[in-house]
Amino acid sequence: MRLIYPSYYHSFSCQASQCPDTCCKGWRISIDGDTLKRYEAAKGPEGEWLREGVDHRSRAYRQKNGRCVFLDRRRLCGLFLRLGEAMMCRTCRVYPRHKEPYGDRLEISLSLSCPAAAQLILNWAEPVEYRDRIRPDREGEPDQAADRELLEGLLRVREAMWAVLRGEG
């Protein structure tokens, strides 16, 4: 499988408590099934703490005053601080990173909804290049059928967007 990513991608760094916003506010964060199973299996006070923070009916973290209950007063993730990244749900582990498969291509990018990602993308001084590498761990897997027309449209729109941002369009 070919992994395609923009030249700025690996320069991203979460601003954590220094962020002017927080991705843990005003967003119902869904919890994937594997993570829910880990929470259910967790023992002792940590397990109880985890389960109290989950709305099991909606399979999402509970909110308090419009914020994730695990967000501490310093605006840091209590889950991460107390139990480590492995106990975070998939959404929290990967955001603002985004993956989109197109047949033998896996496009990865950053979401502009994250202030740090937006600042990085919009202030990137060099022309954005899309890098391509082979993911040997995925060789031999059956690929999804790519919608070539959709992919070609995406690539045209992306190039037009970068032209506008460079002041060429």
Image (tube, grey):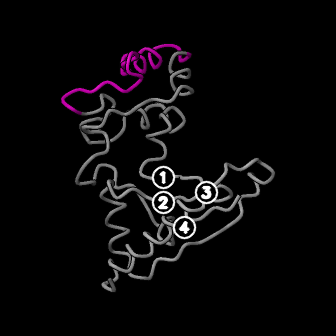
Which residue does the numbered mark 2 point to in the structure image? 109
15 and 31: which one is in front?
31
Picture disc at residue 98 = 1
Callout 3 secondary element:
strand
Callout 4 secondary element:
helix
Q: Position of residue 102 (x, y in %)?
A: 60, 56
- Residue lying farthest to the bottom in this orientation: 168
Number of other residues with Cα within 10 Å of mark 4, as a class: few under 14, some 14 to 19, many 20 or more: few
Q: CA distance from mark 2 to mark 3?
A: 10 Å
Q: Position of residue 141 (x, y in %)?
A: 77, 48
Earlier sequence position, callout 2 versus callout 4: 2
91 and 64: which one is in front?
91
Q: CA distance from mark 4 to mark 3?
A: 14 Å
Q: Which residues are magenta?
A: 41-66
Q: Residue at x 29, y 49 (%)?
A: 17
**Discs 1, 2 touching: Cβ within 8 Å:** yes
Which residue does the numbered mark 3 point to in the structure image? 106
Earlier sequence position, callout 4 versus callout 3: 3
Number of other residues with Cα within 10 Å of mark 2, as a class: few under 14, some 14 to 19, many 20 or more: some
Which residue does the numbered mark 4 point to in the structure image? 152
The nearer-to-camera label among 2 and 3 is 3
Earlier sequence position, callout 1 versus callout 2: 1
Q: CA distance from mark 1 to mark 3?
A: 10 Å
**Discs 2, 3 touching: Cβ within 8 Å:** no
Q: Examine the structure image and report whether residue 140 is included in the region drawn in magenta.
A: no
